[in-house]
Amino acid sequence: MPIKHRNAGEKSPLLRDDWAYASPVSLDDFSTQDWILLDSQRGPYGAAERTKQALEMLTAQASAPTFGYQINNYEHCLQAATLALQDGADDEDIVVALFHDLGFVTNNENHGEFAAAFLKSYISDRNVWMLERHMYFQAVHCATHPAVDPDVRERWRGHPHFEYAANWVARYDVPSINPDFENAPLDTFIPMVERLFATLRRDIPLPD
């Protein structure tokens, strides 16, 4: 879809006709009333747009070519989520599978941390921990790769989430590159994403 260019002097449209713009054009000039206005509209805006914009980040990859895998990263994410769905997983685990490689192309070197940060406010500690490390747990399945240490995950053995991460990667990540597997359509997962994003699990603390 072509992106409409905003000309100078034009404002981006508001989500609702009964909403108002904050007048200042620099944060330095905002009054208390401006912040109250924005905060009153931020919650409903997030509720309406959060799932839509998250899925747009994923679907931006839907037509992307692949560098050698038989399916692209979008299809890989759908496949992982479909496997979790077929296993009877709950909303959280299915949505984690759907977004686990969201940054695989743009942030490959730290795409696990990317996914963990993206979902951290909404998911359990075990899934945050797994997402941050899943690319390293995958290494044991790539033992023939000349630049991969298949034992890299051993540094975390003994951690309470170790077995969960190992099983998750083996069950949902490693086999999800199969072009003969019929993925569930994205629409299947939209209600699950909406339910997960409807409730914040935690506030994110200030960085150290």
Image (tube, rainbow, N blue to C red):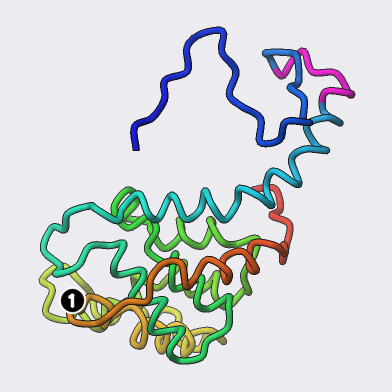
> For mark 1, what is the residue?
179
Q: Residues within 10 Å of mark 1 (few under 14, many from 20)?
A: some
Q: Is residue 101 left or right of residue 119?
A: left
Front-lying residue, 47 or 119: 47
Is 71 colored magenta in this rendering? Answer: no
Seen at 54% across and 75% down, the residue is 127
Is residue 65 shown above or below 159? above
Q: Residue 145: which quarter of the image? A: bottom left
Overall secondary structure of the magenta section: helix
State the image coordinates of residue 141 (x, y, percent, origin top left). Answer: 23, 83
Seen at 60% across and 18% down, the residue is 11
Whether residue 208 is visible, yes or no, is no
Residue most extreme to the right: 33
Seen at 65% across and 60% down, the residue is 121
State the image coordinates of residue 190 (x, y, percent, origin top left). Answer: 52, 66
State the image coordinates of residue 10 (x, y, percent, origin top left). Answer: 56, 13
Is 30 colored magenta in this rendering? Answer: yes
- The magenta segment is 27-34
Q: SS of the residue at dot 1? A: loop
Q: Residue 112: which quarter of the image? A: bottom left
Residue most extreme to the front: 17
Is residue 125 shown above or below 208? below
Seen at 53% across and 84% down, the residue is 161
Q: Is residue 30 left or right of residue 102?
A: right
State the image coordinates of residue 164 (x, y, percent, origin top left). Answer: 49, 87
Q: Which amino acid does the dot numbered 1 rest on?
A: Pro
Whether residue 184 is visible, yes or no, is yes
Q: Is residue 150 left or right of residue 203?
A: left
Front-lying residue, 166 or 78: 78
Front-lying residue, 19 or 154: 19
